[in-house]
Amino acid sequence: MAAPRSAHAALLALLLGGLLAPHAAAQGDWPMFRHDASHSGASGAPPTGTGGRFLWKAATQGEVESSAAIVAGVVYIGSKDNAVYALDAATGAQRWRFATGGLVYGSPAVANGTVFIGSYDKRLYALDAATGAERWNVTTQGVVRSSPAVADGLVFFGSNDHFVYALDAATGAQRWATRTGAEVFYHPTVAAGVVYIGSYDQQLYALNATTGVPVWTFMTGGFIRSTPAVAGGMVFVGSRDKHLYALDAATGAPRWNYTSGDDVSAAPAVAGGIVYIGSQDDNITALNATDGRVVWQVRTGGPVVSSPAVVGGLVYVGSEDRTFRALDAATGQLMWTFPVARGIISSPSIADGVVYFGSLDRNVYAVTAGPPASPPPLPPPGKPPSGNGTTGTPGDGSAAPAPAPPPGPPSSPAPASPGGAGQREDSALLLLGIGAAAVLGLWAWRGKRGAR
């Protein structure tokens, strides 16, 4: 591992940059992947406006699988055009762009005026949050797809050189490096002095955050691409073996597991005693956090690799079916949808009443968070919620019910009023597209009625 710049140079850059740096993360910010170092995927700052309204989109030159960090009115996000972007949260206008030497899959973390981000050029970068100027970088022996987590003055991340690293956040000096049995592509979680991270050796590792010494390990039956979430003394993590595991956070002892129809690579979100997961069998599922029983399940039209976020009683999540959804957290009822041109792997981030996410169509989107202007009608008693959802019976211990048919065309959000520096949706083109879709749908119905 190459040495970072000298400690004196890094500290000087930190002090000078701090004069221009944004304020520290406020309560309404979303400063890193999954909101916080414990990666709960939940925030206690509920939106107050009407959800599903388009605000802006900002174009990059590559697919956006990265998820946004939002601090002090700035959106930080990576792109597969090898760059990291800082965008104005209100307008989408570009504040700065920093080019790395490789693809940027991971998500940035922002702490104390510094943006931390990994790259396929094998480096982890520390950038000035206000200007994008490089403060330091550290080189590993493998690509860095892992999204860093910052806690207690340390930045934690994995590399596909098989190591998990802890660096001094101010200088980049290495505190420890712990070797796993295979590549570490995905993201660490930090809670109560322990780092939880999965590896392609099929194991979940719990490491002492100060020393890197393993506290315990847990073997699954597949690669671990899911980011652990820690809540209520338990750690929840998915695996390519189609399971979501609930483990005792202190000992690694299994509490329960849930079997899905395919890979569980999305990170779970935990809020109000419920665990929300996406899976590559096209489902979004809510489980009782205590015993794993199904609360509800909603079928989408494509794999769900985007990790759900829970804010203000709503679950926000994207899908590879080109649709972003807001669901009622208690029932799975579909509240609103927002269509994009290509699939969504990026996970949503919510700050100040706005949800931000990227798409494989190379854009970053800003859409209002919150309930729709007119709540959807409630289903009759005993019926699944509308909006392609199915429900289980809470507390019955049964398997998930059979999924509903794939959804119809997603509803279109109302475009925002003109103005602002970000790119705006063309309402005329949107109406033209809706009309064309209606004509084609009528033709298909007449010619192929009864087909599915």
Image (spheres, grey):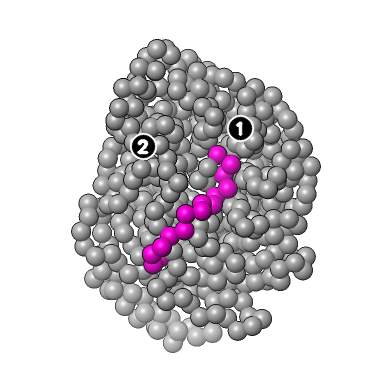
Q: Which residues are magenta?
A: 37-52
Between 51 and 54, the one lying in front of the other is 51
Question: Which residue corresponds to mark 2?
Answer: 23
The reply to whether the magenta stretch includes residue 43 is yes
Q: Which residue corresponds to the image point at 61% horizontal and 77% vertical from the top-left?
A: 384
Q: Which residue corresponds to the image point at 29% horizontal and 74% vertical from the top-left?
A: 431
Please determine whether, in this image, residue 430 is positioned above or below residue 442.
above
Q: Which residue corresponds to the image point at 42% horizontal and 31% vertical from the top-left?
A: 112
Question: Which residue corresponds to mark 1?
Answer: 183
Residue 299 seen in render: no
| Relative image position of residue 261 (x, y in whole percent) | 67, 59
| Relative image position of residue 96 (x, y in whole percent) | 28, 37
- What number is the disc on residue 282? none
The reply to whether the magenta stretch includes residue 38 is yes
**From mark 1 to mark 2, how far is it between C-alphas?**
36 Å
| Relative image position of residue 315 (x, y in whole percent) | 53, 60
What residue type is disc 2 on? His
Mark 1 surroundings: few (<14), some (14-19) or many (≥20) residues within 10 A: many
Please determine whether, in this image, residue 232 is positioned above or below residue 211.
below
Quadrant where the C terminus lies?
A: bottom right
Q: Which residue corresponds to the image point at 52% horizontal and 23% vertical from the top-left?
A: 167
Q: Name the dominant secondary structure of the magenta segment.
A: loop
